[in-house]
Image (cartoon, coloured by chain):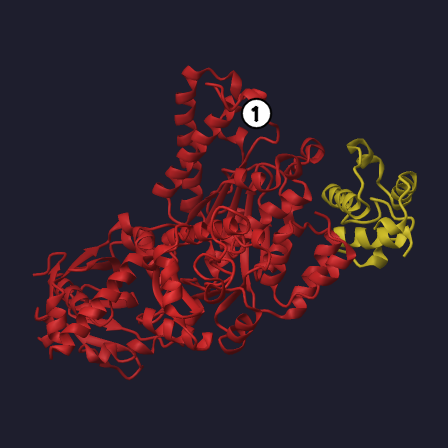
């Protein structure tokens, strides 16, 4: 499973959506369920799933799938962490 | 603790929601949201019966983020929640009949408050509040909280759970706080205790959850997430979220599941380590060393459960004299002979023993919790008595003292005098039985026996001071119960306060002891001269002593003195109340064409005469 697929699963669970609704280019604007509460769910789920401790300042910056993927890459996350 | 893939596979093999709940709790496991979602699907696939509950949440901090954890822990407790979140912070406005909360018609309302909501002075650090001002602030907090909870109680149906968020920060005076005269912690505990007292004494169906206990279970740093607290006003980590959700749903489940009444304990490797028949009096593990210490703690736990109002029974495959020797003489044994309301120490199959215990105690098997270390015995009971809840005692001694900690059916939301004295009452019943046997052997009949008891019945009417017990009786009584209509404390308070309803109750004392309140009848006035018997019930503890007739006759005489000429009544059959199938016709009620019953109170029927072996004190009759 790629990091993106893993992220798809995490976000779909956090937002209670089918995985297919989460696309490689999705942003907060595209997905109605991805509101501020949904965003906190995603952040908490990312931390749990990849065993991260994120800086709260990063929360606001991670408002799209590409940004989250870039962040995960910078944290040296690969799908085996999951 | 994180759950590895291997552990997740094991969890996904759980056979029941409760088994899964226990597995998670024993290892302090906290699933990720994705794992929780998989486990939730697994529970759904098991198709266990569950109860749908409407939950309303009133909150002064973000509560919506609790939802996935609430739904997950609800599933573990065999519940399904329909959750409504009140608008953020509008606490008082929600306590009106036209609010969104009232429109949701909640079965349960969870009120989430913060420490700072209690009083404006608490917005600063408590260490800054002068000792001289503290008393006044304390009184104001109490008044404000009583006012707030009262408004919800008056305007929202169902049960209410209140909890106050402790400070996410450690005490202001640091490590010295516990010693300081102006200690924050001591003051907070004082306020909490007085709030809990107020709630218990002033309100029905309101439960205070002490969130500090949840914090202690996992630790402050594991419970609170300061990043989320400051950025989103949501205080909890996933661990904290799960702990809060679990506490709330466990209480909700305890309010909605069939009440447990009896804990049946095994002896070997349950009350003590080892096998008494093989290891002997001095060889069993029970005392100050490992693993004996764990068993001593487990016995303390069981004694606390007895204090919660559960009856203890013993069921062990052993020679009776071996077990009795430990019960009576072992220096570290805490559970003594008199703590058990009934015992079966023999070599019979355990399901047979449970059946005969149910008969002796006059209680249904679905109120039994069977606690045993043997896989074989647990499987045998599960197989032949599906209504009995079976707890397999862990094989590792350190896990034993807490093995009953996560059972919703062992949680209580009230504690009455009757609960505290229950086992003593069953012991008295054993003595009554032997008196009866002595009298019978001497050729005496039932009447002689009843006369010999010197019974005194005290009948009360619309007594708010016994509200908890009166509501509890409708919740717990299954067999001697004409209609099985259940009422919570709030419903009961309404009936007591309503001039058109009369709630009668009785307690029965005899030469062996006082039963406490064991019978209840509710009368609804339908017109100036007719009334309806809404319910008539009696605890099985006093069956066979003519108490039901004495109680009914007192009620009838009271009604007649108030001008009532006709009393209608129903018998609503259930799986358990066949005992009272003929109670109404046996007592002068005539069956009508529509299957209901009516009794003419003007007819002089023998039952109205005071010819019971019971002296009755009660409300004015003639």
Q: Which residue is mark 1?
A: B171
Taking the image as shown, residue B513 lies to the left or right of residue B114, namely left
What is the number of callouts on the image? 1
- Horizontal and vertical percent position of residue B84: 58, 50
What residue is shown at x 38% (from left), y 38% (from top)?
B197
Q: Secondary structure at mark 1?
A: loop
- Horizontal and vertical percent position of residue B283: 48, 58
Q: Colour of chain B?
A: red
**B201 above or below B606?**
above
Tell me if I can see residue B424 in this picture: yes
Chain assignment, label 1: B
What residue is shown at x 68% (from left), y 45% (from top)?
B238
Tell me if I can see residue B344 in this picture: no
Residue B37 sits in quarter: bottom right
**B546 above or below B617?**
below
- Horizontal and vertical percent position of residue B516: 25, 56
* Letter of the chain in yellow: A
**B236 above or below B323?**
above
User: In the displayed image of the protein, which residue is found farthest to the bottom?
Assistant: B593
Who is closer to the viewer here, B50 or B59? B50
Who is closer to the viewer here, B200 or A21? B200
Taking the image as shown, residue B284 lies to the left or right of residue B424, namely right
Who is closer to the viewer here, A69 or B285? B285
Q: Residues within 10 Å of mark 1 (few under 14, many from 20)?
A: some
Locate the C terminus of chain B and report the quarter of the image it occupies: bottom left
- Horizontal and vertical percent position of residue B49: 56, 69
Taking the image as shown, residue B222 lies to the left or right of residue B412, namely right
Residue A27 sits in quarter: top right
């Amino acid at each position: 499973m790629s990091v993106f697929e893993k992220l798809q699963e995490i976000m779909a669970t956090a937002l209670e959506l089918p995985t297919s609704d989460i696309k490689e280019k999705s942003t907060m604007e595209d997905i109605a369920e991805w509101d501020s509460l949904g965003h906190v769910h995603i952040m908490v789920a990312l931390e749990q799933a990849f065993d991260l401790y994120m800086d709260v300042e990063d929360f606001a910056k991670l408002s799209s799938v590409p940004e989250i993927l870039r962040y995960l890459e910078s944290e040296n996350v690969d799908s085996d962490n999951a | 603790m994180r759950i590895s893939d291997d552990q997740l596979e094991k969890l996904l093999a759980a056979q029941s929601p409760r088994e899964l709940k226990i597995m998670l709790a024993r290892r302090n496991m906290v699933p990720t949201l994705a794992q929780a979602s998989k486990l939730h699907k697994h529970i759904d696939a098991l198709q266990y019966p569950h109860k749908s509950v409407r939950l309303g949440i009133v909150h002064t901090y973000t509560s919506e983020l609790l939802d996935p954890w609430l739904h997950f822990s609800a599933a573990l407790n065999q519940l399904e929640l329909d959750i409504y979140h009140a608008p953020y912070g509008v606490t008082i406005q929600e306590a009106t009949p036209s609010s969104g909360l009232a429109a949701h018609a909640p079965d349960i309302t969870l009120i989430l408050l913060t420490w700072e909501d209690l009083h404006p002075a608490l917005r600063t650090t408590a260490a800054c509040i002068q000792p001289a001002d503290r008393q006044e602030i304390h009184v104001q907090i109490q008044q404000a909280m009583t006012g707030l909870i009262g408004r919800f109680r008056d305007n929202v149906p169902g049960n209410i759970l209140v909890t106050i968020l402790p400070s996410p920060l450690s005490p202001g005076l640091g490590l010295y706080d516990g010693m300081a005269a102006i200690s924050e912690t001591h003051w907070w505990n004082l306020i909490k205790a007085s709030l809990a007292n107020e709630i218990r004494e002033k309100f029905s169906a309101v439960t205070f959850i002490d969130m500090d206990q949840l914090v202690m279970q996992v630790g402050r740093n594991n419970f609170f997430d300061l990043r989320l607290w400051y950025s989103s006003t949501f205080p909890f980590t996933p661990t904290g979220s799960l702990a809060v959700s679990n506490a709330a749903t466990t209480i909700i489940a305890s309010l909605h599941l069939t009440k447990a009444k009896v804990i049946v304990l095994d002896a070997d490797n349950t009350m003590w380590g080892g096998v008494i028949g093989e290891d002997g009096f001095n060889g069993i593990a029970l005392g100050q060393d490992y693993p004996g210490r764990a068993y001593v703690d487990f016995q303390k736990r069981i004694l606390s459960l007895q204090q919660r109002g559960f009856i203890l029974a013993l069921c062990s495959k052993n020679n009776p004299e071996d077990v009795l020797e430990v019960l009576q003489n072992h220096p570290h044994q805490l559970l003594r002979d008199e703590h058990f309301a009934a015992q079966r120490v023999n070599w019979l199959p355990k399901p047979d023993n449970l059946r005969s215990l149910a008969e002796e105690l006059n209680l249904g098997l679905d109120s039994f919790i069977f606690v045993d270390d043997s896989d074989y015995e647990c499987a045998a009971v599960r197989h032949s008595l599906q209504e009995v809840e079976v707890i397999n005692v862990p094989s590792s001694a350190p896990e034993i003292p807490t093995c009953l900690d996560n059972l919703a059916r062992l949680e209580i939301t009230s504690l009455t005098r009757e609960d505290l004295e229950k086992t003593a009452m069953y012991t008295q019943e054993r003595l009554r039985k032997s008196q009866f046997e002595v009298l019978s052997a001497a050729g005496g009949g039932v009447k002689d026996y009843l006369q010999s008891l010197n019974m005194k019945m005290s009948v009360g009417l619309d007594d708010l001071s016994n509200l908890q017990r009166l509501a509890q009786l409708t919740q717990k009584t299954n067999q001697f119960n004409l209609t099985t209509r259940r009422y919570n404390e709030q419903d009961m308070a309404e009936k007591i306060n309503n001039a058109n309803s009369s709630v009668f109750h009785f307690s029965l004392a005899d030469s062996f002891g006082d039963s406490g309140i064991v019978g209840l009848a509710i009368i609804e006035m339908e017109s100036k001269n007719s009334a309806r018997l809404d319910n008539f019930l009696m605890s099985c503890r006093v069956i066979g002593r003519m108490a039901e007739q004495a109680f009914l006759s007192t009620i009838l005489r009271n009604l007649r003195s108030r001008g009532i000429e006709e009393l209608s009544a129903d018998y609503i059959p259930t799986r358990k109340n066949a005992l009272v199938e003929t109670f109404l016709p046996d007592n002068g009620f005539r069956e009508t064409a529509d299957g209901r019953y009516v009794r003419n109170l003007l007819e002089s029927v023998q039952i109205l005469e005071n010819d019971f072996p019971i002296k009755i004190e009660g409300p004015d009759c003639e």
